[in-house]
Image (cartoon, rainbow, N blue to C red):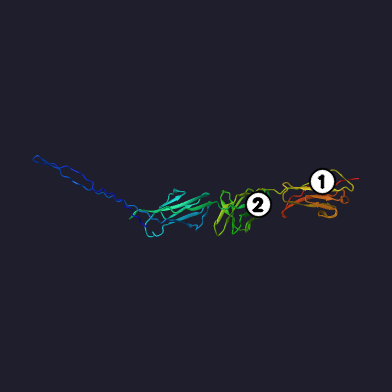
């Protein structure tokens, strides 16, 4: 609705008396001249009582925005369609650089909370401007970041496969992409292949493709907002040569008749190792030793019952990790009996 404001100033019946002198002989005649001044000042200004409305065009009706997303706001002036307007946009009350269009587009680059308003101005024909719109509050947050874990944890030994796991909580709808840094320090996608097995949230690297110093990272993708996550922190594979087990005997010196013996097998670092035991006899060479009435296996130790301790018997051990990787055999020890 256009309002016309007219301010009228009238100065009515302002008398200006002039003296006109006529000389008719000795007589003087005074004539009175009344001048009526009328001044009218017309002031024209216009505004519309309609308040613009800010709508979120993209992403559609979403007030939670993620870093990296492009946002488009739209300023609507109801009842004024078809007229030519220029638009001003404000963020927290501060005017924003724009092309004075009804749509304002920007990219969310940092975590932020802000209120946006708009105003329309028309200069063609009857000049007119609107009130400021009501505010639309937008909150910009970071995309979720995946957690990348490695199994086995560092270090990895030669001949051992590696499984990476990528997780985002909550997990709904996410699939995962895998990346490896090449020699030019560029991240390249890792697809399913004979060397790489992708299974939902895991990537398994075949043992002959596990290389010391290789770096990997992952990222989540899904069909709805946010359609992608941040990249995970990268992990660097540390690959070491297969270790040799160390075998010790308790008691250290000669064993007395009927005295039990405890052997201990160790590999450093110790994480993930189980141990296998072997005995050499004169008839069959090296044979596996397992839990029995004569042998007690307890994690990294083997205890030989006193009546099973035989002078000259030899023992050795090795470690097994994840059921696949086997360490080098330890040095053998020979039991010596004292009478």
Res. 70 in view: yes
Q: Mark 2 near mark 1, Cβ–Cβ under 8 Å?
A: no
* CA distance separating discs 2 and 1: 35 Å
Classify mark 1: helix, strand or loop: strand
Q: Residue furthest right?
A: 339
Q: Which residue is mark 1?
A: 249
User: Which badge, 2 or 1, comes first in the chain's sequence?
Assistant: 2
In the image, 104: left or right of 193?
left
For residue 254, what is the image quadrant?
top right
* Percent of width and height locating residue 52: 42, 56
Crowd rating for badge 2 (residues with CA inside 10 Å; few <14, some 14–19, many 20+) = some
Q: Residue furthest left?
A: 25
In the foreground, 107 or 297: 107
In the foreground, 186 or 223: 223
Classify mark 2: helix, strand or loop: strand
Q: Which residue is mark 2?
A: 150
Q: Quadrant of the C terminus?
A: top right
Q: Residue furthest top?
A: 26
* Percent of width and height locating residue 288: 80, 54
Q: Residue 49 got which mark?
A: none
In the image, 33: left or right of 149?
left
* Percent of width and height locating residue 258: 89, 48
């Amino acid at each position: 609705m256009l309002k016309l404001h007219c301010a009228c100033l009238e100065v009515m019946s302002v008398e200006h008396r002039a003296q006109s002198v006529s000389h008719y002989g000795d007589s003087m005649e005074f004539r009175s001249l009344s001048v009526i001044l009328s001044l009218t000042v017309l002031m024209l200004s216009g505004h519309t009582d309609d308040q613009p409305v800010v709508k979120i065009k993209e992403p559609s009706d979403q007030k939670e925005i993620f870093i990296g997303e492009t946002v488009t706001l739209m300023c609507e002036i109801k009842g004024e369609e078809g007229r030519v307007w220029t638009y001003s946009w404000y963020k927290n009350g501060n005017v924003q650089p724009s092309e004075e269009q009804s749509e304002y587009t920007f990219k969310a680059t940092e975590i932020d909370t802000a209120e946006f308003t708009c105003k329309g101005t028309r200069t063609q024909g009857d000049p007119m401007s609107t009130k400021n719109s009501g505010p639309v509050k937008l909150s910009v947050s970071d995309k979720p970041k995946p957690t990348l874990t490695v199994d086995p944890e560092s270090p990895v030994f030669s001949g051992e496969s590696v499984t990476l796991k990528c997780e985002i909580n909550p997990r709904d709808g996410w699939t995962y992409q895998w990346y490896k840094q090449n020699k030019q320090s560029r991240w390249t996608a890792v697809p399913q292949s004979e060397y790489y097995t992708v299974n939902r949230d895991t990537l398994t690297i075949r043992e002959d493709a596990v290389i010391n110093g290789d770096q990997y990272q992952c990222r989540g993708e899904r069909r709805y907002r946010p359609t992608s996550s941040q990249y995970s922190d990268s992990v660097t594979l540390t690959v070491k040569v297969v270790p040799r087990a160390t075998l010790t005997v308790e008691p250290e010196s000669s064993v007395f008749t009927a005295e039990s013996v405890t052997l201990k097998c160790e590999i450093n670092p110790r994480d993930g190792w189980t141990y296998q035991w072997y005995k050499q006899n004169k008839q069959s060479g090296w044979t596996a030793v397992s839990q029995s009435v004569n042998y007690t296996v307890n994690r990294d130790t083997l205890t030989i019952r006193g009546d099973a301790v035989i002078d000259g018997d030899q023992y050795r051990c090795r470690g097994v990790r994840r059921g696949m990787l086997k360490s080098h055999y330890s040095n053998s020890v020979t039991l010596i009996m004292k009478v």
